[in-house]
Image (spheres, grey):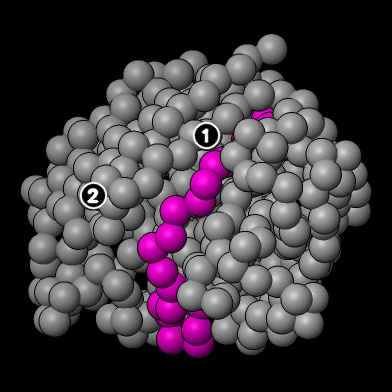
Amino acid sequence: MCQEMLRVNLTNHQYDIQIERHLLKKCGQWVQTLWKPQRIAVITDSNVAPLYGKMVTESLEACDFQVSLFVVPAGEQSKSLEQAANLYDLLAEDGFTRSDGIIALGGGVIGDLVGFVASTYMRGLHFLQIPTTLVSQVDSSIGGKTAVNTKNAKNLVGTFSQPDGVLIDPEVLNTLDDRRLREGIAEIIKSAAIADENLWDLLASMKDEFELLERAEEVIIPSLKVKRTVVEEDEFDNGSRLTLNFGHTIGHGIENTAGYGVVSHGEGVAVGMVMISKHAEAIGEMPSGTTAQLIQMIEKFHLPTQLEIDSQAVYQAITHDKKARGSQLKIILLEKIGQAKIVSIPIETMKDYLQ
């Protein structure tokens, strides 16, 4: 059994990421080390609630917390201002105040939505992240980005708000369907590609996504270390943290235009990494052969490397991207596998990357 703790050290806030199998059923004891007895809203979705809602609630109640369980519909469509407003109403009707806490129990959608609600309800309640998908365990549950989608763009409305702690139980990944497992692998491939050649070599040594699942901690921990490093350097996403967006500029545009939930986040990122690398390599901005390496890795884990897209619609979605600055857009390319660079291009040039 692997047990590890990583500390995220920010200027005004520090918190720990606890990684241990079967830790979820002891989450009440973990919360006791962070919060005094109080009211807690556990917010989850309709997929996770039947699996882990009772376990988490009972563990918290056994440790003298008063718990309310709120369940939202599963899926990317719930990451919306409308669903946030519903949660504000539920919290208000249940009498939650700034002395109370919120726990996000679920994948990236729940983590982003609940973090946004916690950071804005009564101008901010403290909250914890308990991610239950691979993509949320290796990426979205740490770093403090919270957001909801609008019709114009993914994650267009949001805040920077750090949790008080993150609990990662790799055992819960066994209840993921294969598509959701692969979605998280796209983020691990990204982390390796931008900052960790050793992680890339580890992925290369694995047969497929099922071997990766058996060895989950071996890839979760280095992926978290990649993200922790850039978050500590650049909490508010103005500099080096942008490297985490490799594949995301195009990927978010694909997600938006396909309809949220039709193309998963990981599928969009996988295709985005390939598309941006192909053109960058063609114009000499990335080393020859890099795209082939990416394609080989992505295909091994049964993720897509191309999709039919409406390039004009994707371009319009990208113009609303948060990485755009006036007529310029910052994109992420690779110096080599394991090292990324930030390049500023005219937004118009993005049309060439979408061909």
Residue 255 horizontal side relative to residue 24, left or right = left
Along the line of sight, the residue nearer the viewer: 351 or 72: 72
Residue 355 horizontal side relative to residue 253, left or right = left
Q: Secondary structure at mark 2?
A: loop
Residue 233 horizontal side relative to residue 144, left or right = left
Instruction: Find residue 86 and report its horizontal and vertical position in percent.
Output: 71, 83
Residue in the picture at 48% in, 60% down = 268
Instruction: Find residue 19 and report its horizontal and vertical position in percent.
Output: 60, 27
Residue in the picture at 18% in, 63% down = 330
**Image quadrant occupied by the N terminus:** top right
168 magenta-colored: yes
Specify the quadrant of the image occupied by residue 63.
top right
Amino acid on which the number 2 mark rests in the picture: Asp
Q: CA distance from mark 1 to mark 2?
A: 18 Å
Amino acid on which the number 1 mark rests in the picture: Ile
Along the line of sight, the residue nearer the viewer: 52 or 123: 123
Image height of 72 relative to 13, above or below: below
Q: Residues within 10 Å of mark 2 (few under 14, many from 20)?
A: some
Image height of 49 relative to 252, above or below: above
Along the line of sight, the residue nearer the viewer: 116 or 293: 116
Instruction: Find residue 293 and report its horizontal and vertical position in percent.
Output: 34, 34
Q: Which residue is mark 2?
A: 234
Mark identifier at residue 17: 1
Q: Which residues are magenta?
A: 148-175
Sequence-first tag of 1 and 2: 1
Name of the residue lying farthest toward the top: 1
